[in-house]
Amino acid sequence: MIIKEFRELARDRRTLVLLVALPVVLLTVFGYAANLNVSQLKVAVVGPDAAGTARQLEAHPSAAERLRIVGQHPAGTDPVPLLQRQEADVVFVADSANPHLPLAMRSHVHVDGARLLAAEAAQGIFARLLAADLAPHLAADPDLARLAELGTAGALPLTVHFNPDLRTSWVMIPGLIGLVLSFVGTIITSIGLVREREAGTLEQLAVMPLRPSAIILGKITPYLLLALADMVVITVVGRVLFDVPFVGSLALFAFTAVVFCFLVLGIGVFVSSVSGTTGQAVQSAIMFVMPQVLLSGLVFPLEAMPLGIRALGYCFPLTWFIEVAHGLMLRGAPVGHLAWPVGVLTAMAVVSFGAATVRMRWLLTHGGAR
């Protein structure tokens, strides 16, 4: 019996690959991706002497390697749109160009709380930087009356936007919406066509006067409605139980969710069309869904990953959906600022549905044979 099982396993090459090669690949990829340390922050500087302040930040030994200046803006520039557009993780606003004043007296730090780990890193980095900058000023002028001008000397002049309390649930729930849609759309749908083949009813679809695209639409519509219902439930539960805000365009979010559902449903149909059994379909779907959990930015920040792993993460639909969900639910980003991720998802959906249609046409013309 043992020998027989080994022979059966040797014949099932897909399962053999899953058991032998996949763990090695996943360990290698996830080992590089599993990094919670944000090594560098993008900083935009606002002020009357933004260039001089930027040079001062870059030259400061306590944070020089952790900060990357990405923009210099004149005084009066609103820091919130810079954070909404994700041009910077931190906006450093200097109210005065007087180099004789400590930075803590003449600056304010604005942080994007929707990027939880980056915001936490920014708090620590700028607390050390401002404290180190303040120390020589205190040593040179210990007059307590002058220190009173600082208010609470050494306090961090920092404002966290979009997620003031740095709640993990606020950051996770928008991503979990996409993860649930991926699970329902890919894994559950992938079983459908395989069941048709196993039941011997695929031949009946071949003689029906319907286009392959119409057959696919008929098969995925129930799953589409189920996935959208799940999305509504999760969004409402997140709002009621965890007070997750929704400050952006509801219409754009609904459109993005429908596009994303079509995308993952198309992938599910394609996976089922190249699988011989229900088990193979589930295995292939899991191989697609599982990497997205760690490489989409849902758990580990993309900016903390090596460049190659980060590029791989941008190949997954969930990465782009999370960017849109965070932009709409937390940041309230304008529609135009989300055109790129929505466009990428739309292009992926067209390719996914097109590939599923071509594959379905091939199956129908070959009597259901792979």
Image (spheres, rainbow, N blue to C red):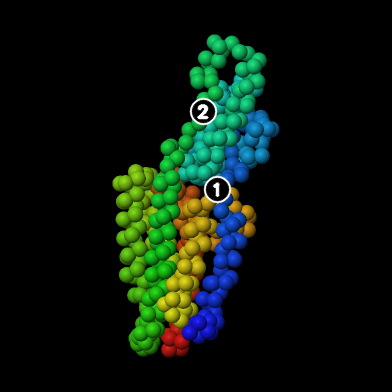
Name the amino acid type tagged 1: Leu
Position of 151 relative to 320 (above/below): above
The residue wearing badge 1 is: 36
57 left or right, relative to 223: right
Quarter residue 53 falls in: top right
Q: 1 or 235, which lies in front?
A: 1
Residue 163 point in image, percent of width and height: 43, 40
Of badges 1 and 2, the one in the foreground is 1
Query: Which residue sits at x=40%, y=46%?
Result: 169
Name the amino acid type tagged 2: Pro
Q: Is residue 267 visible?
A: no
Please identify the residue farthest to the front as the structure is shown: 1
Quarter residue 257 falls in: bottom left
Query: Which residue sits at x=49%, y=43%?
Result: 116
N-terminal label among 1 and 2: 1
Position of 87 relative to 310 (above/below): above
Query: Which residue sits at x=41%, y=55%?
Result: 176
Q: What element carries label 2?
A: loop
Task: Find out whether the residues at labels 1 and 2 contact each other: C-beta distance under 8 Å.
Answer: no
Query: Which residue sits at x=36%, y=71%?
Result: 220
